[in-house]
Amino acid sequence: MAAAMGGRRRLIIYEPFRSIFYAPQFVALHGGDFAAEALDVEVVTASAGVTTTAALMDGHSEIALGGIMRSLDVADRGGPFLVHFAEVNSRNGFFLLTRQPRPHFTWTDLVGTTVIDFAEAPTPWQCLLTVLRKHGVDPGSVRIERTRPLPDALAAFRAGHGDFFQTGQPFTEALIADGTAHLAASMGEATGPVPFSSYMTTQRFLRDGRDVLLRFTRALYAAQRRMARADAKEIADVIAPAFADIPPDIRQRAVARYLAQHTWARDPVIRRDGYDYLRRILLDGGFITRPHRYEDLIDTTIATQVMGRS
């Protein structure tokens, strides 16, 4: 009824990169949840020319998906507050792969080695630094390379460069399946619960576009509830149109691994303790210089209204 009252609405969503990690977005899109809220959603993958935060600030988009670290970075440089209103990922979605099997892996194994790391976003690297310090390993004793775009990093590791490789999905499953790599550690498990990715918007749209944000978040919450009841094959099948280039077995294994470690949020509320943990990771790693307030960058009123708590 609320959707019908609002009328059909076209909405462009910017994502930082295309990833199975963002499965809730594609469950909502291809499972019909956005359509049920009369939202015609187009997902655009950001590029070097237009990032997710730039898309919001320049008016290319009203909603973008990404890490809270992106808003923290903008605020740290004196930019506007880009407010996150709905959580998508409740854990780190990256994995530490090793060239040789290490059945008794410990974090001290990284001392003196080379880790090829994900260059497209800083949060996986910042989490790795935190995990190393937590286990008594000086990050300076590990050579962490963040210079190669993902295709080049993947090619370099396949060609024999580096001892470890930190990457996401479906690359983790593909490298394990063909014997190129072995799983050393899940960074989701090693980092612990953290609001890794969420939807953000401008302060202006938070004020003026509330009806659209409510409909959007209702759709996301419907997808989250469906995913909580589904198995890996069901989810992998629904999101297939967004990942046509990924073999079905690899897609299903990627979803299964994410499900097993509770990667995806069960509801859209971004909680203060998770924000505080993420902020500490980014402060300790030197990515931000000031502790920005939860109240400035997080809004929970839409999520709680959608969940019927207000």
Image (tube, rainbow, N blue to C red):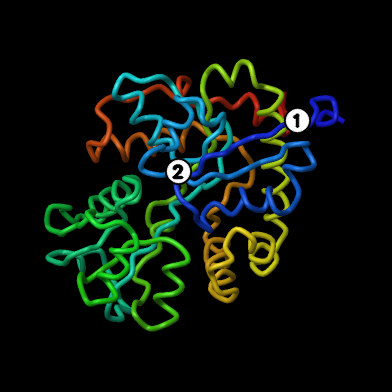
For label 1, count other residues whose C-alpha is less than 10 Å away and answer few (under 14), some (14-19) or many (20+): few
* Picture coordinates of residue 73, whole percent (x, y): 33, 31
Query: Which quadrant does the C terminus fall into?
Result: top right
- The residue lying at 59 percent from left, 66 percent from top is 244
Of 172 and 40, the residue lying toward us: 40
Secondary structure type for disc 1 = loop
Q: Amino acid at mark 2?
A: Ala
Secondary structure type for disc 2 = loop
For label 2, count other residues whose C-alpha is less than 10 Å away and answer few (under 14), some (14-19) or many (20+): many
Q: Is residue 47 above or below residue 162?
A: above
Query: Which quadrant of the view contains residue 231?
Result: bottom right
Horizontal side, residue 123 vs residue 261: left or right = left
Horizontal side, residue 70 vs residue 203: left or right = left
Of 29 and 282, the residue lying toward us: 29
**Which numbered dot is residue 46?**
2
Task: Name, please, the residue furthest toward the front.
Answer: 49
Query: Which quadrant of the view contains residue 99?
Result: bottom left
Task: Name, please, the residue furthest toward the right.
Answer: 1
- The residue lying at 42 percent from left, 61 percent from top is 168
Horizontal side, residue 181 vs residue 86: left or right = left
* Picture coordinates of residue 277, whole percent (x, y): 39, 38
**Which numbered dot is residue 222?**
none
- The residue lying at 29 percent from left, 70 percent from top is 155
Q: Amino acid at mark 1?
A: Gly
Q: Is residue 77 above or below residue 114?
A: above
Which badge, 1 or 2, is on the more N-terminal residue? 2
Of 35 and 292, the residue lying toward us: 35
Q: Is residue 160 above or below residue 68?
A: below
Q: What distance separates the C-alpha of mark 1 from that of mark 2?
A: 33 Å
Residue at the spot of label 1:
308
